[in-house]
Image (cartoon, rainbow, N blue to C red):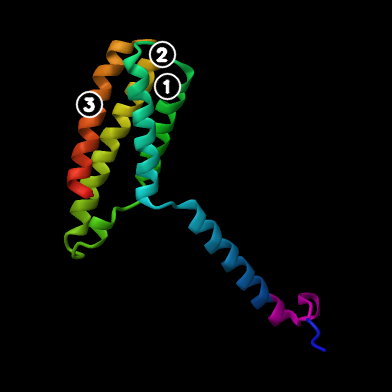
């Protein structure tokens, strides 16, 4: 019959190793959950772009459109922390410039997303439509550069 040894029965050194392994395991799991794949973030971003685009076709601001515009900001902000695979596949000497370009494009997208959200909050549908055109162009440029 096999008996399990409780961590409470370990000596101090074994307890420290056990705790270190447990901490590392939990940290790695949390880290893996904290950072999603860029394609998943962009998919969520695209879903919310579609939602606001369809909503703007009605010409009326709805709570769902406002929520979608807030999620756009959230996903753009999340994407700032994830380096695209196309950049990671570049030679090391080219990466800093590519990361800087990606960061600049994401920051510009974020600024436009905030302006879009503010236009919706204020009920300015015509301004929101104009900003959505700008957001769509920025999104297409980002895909062209980094997808």
Residue nearest the observer in this picture, 12 or 132: 132
Density class for disc 2 (Cα within 10 Å; few <14, some 14-19, many ≥20) is: some
Q: Which residue is mark 3?
A: 134
At x 18%, y 39%, the residue is 141
Is residue 64 in the magenta section?
Answer: no
User: Where does label 1 land, which residue?
Assistant: 65
- In whole angstroms, how far apart are the C-alphas of marks 1 and 2? 6 Å
Please tell me the numbered disc located at residue 81.
none
- For disc 1, the neighbor class at 10 Å (few under 14, some 14 to 19, many from 20) is many
Q: In the image, is residue 45 above or below residue 119?
A: below
Q: Is residue 119 left or right of residue 24?
A: left
Q: Position of residue 88 (x, y in %)?
A: 26, 60
N-terminal of the two: label 2 or label 3? 2
The picture places residue 42, in percent across and down from the top left corner, at: 35, 43
Q: Quadrant of the N terminus?
A: bottom right
Q: Which residue is mark 2?
A: 61
Return the disc, 1 or 3, that comes first in the chain's sequence. 1
Under circle 1, the secondary element is: helix
Magenta stretch: helix, strand or loop mostly: helix
Q: Is residue 49 left or right of residue 95?
A: right
In the rendering, at what x and y percent does residue 5 appear? 78, 81
Say which element carries label 3: helix
Residue 13 located within the stretch drawn in magenta: yes
Q: Secondary structure at mark 2?
A: loop
In space, the residues marked 1 and 3 are separated at their CA atoms by 17 Å
Q: Is residue 86 above or below residue 79?
A: below
Q: Is there a contact, CB below 8 Å, between mark 1 and mark 2?
A: yes
**Other residues around mark 3 within 10 Å, as few (<14) / some (14–19) / many (≥20):** some
| Circle 2 or circle 3, nearest the eye | 2
Q: Which residues are magenta?
A: 5-15
Q: Quadrant of residue 94?
A: bottom left
Question: Badges 1 and 3: C-beta atoms under 8 Å apart?
Answer: no
């Amino acid at each position: 019959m096999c008996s399990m040894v409780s961590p409470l029965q370990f000596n101090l050194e074994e307890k420290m190793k056990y705790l270190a392994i447990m901490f590392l395991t939990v940290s790695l799991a949390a880290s893996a959950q904290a950072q999603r794949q860029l394609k998943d973030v962009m998919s969520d971003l695209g879903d919310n772009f579609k939602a606001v685009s369809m909503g703007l076709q009605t010409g009326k601001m709805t709570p769902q459109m406002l929520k979608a515009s807030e999620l756009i900001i959230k996903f753009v902000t999340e994407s700032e922390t994830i380096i695209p695979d196309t950049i990671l596949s570049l030679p090391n000497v080219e990466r800093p410039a590519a990361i800087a370009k990606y960061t600049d494009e994401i920051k510009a997208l974020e600024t436009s997303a905030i302006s879009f959200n503010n236009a919706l909050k204020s009920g300015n549908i015509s301004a929101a439509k104009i900003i959505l055109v700008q957001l769509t162009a920025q999104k297409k440029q980002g895909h062209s550069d980094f997808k």
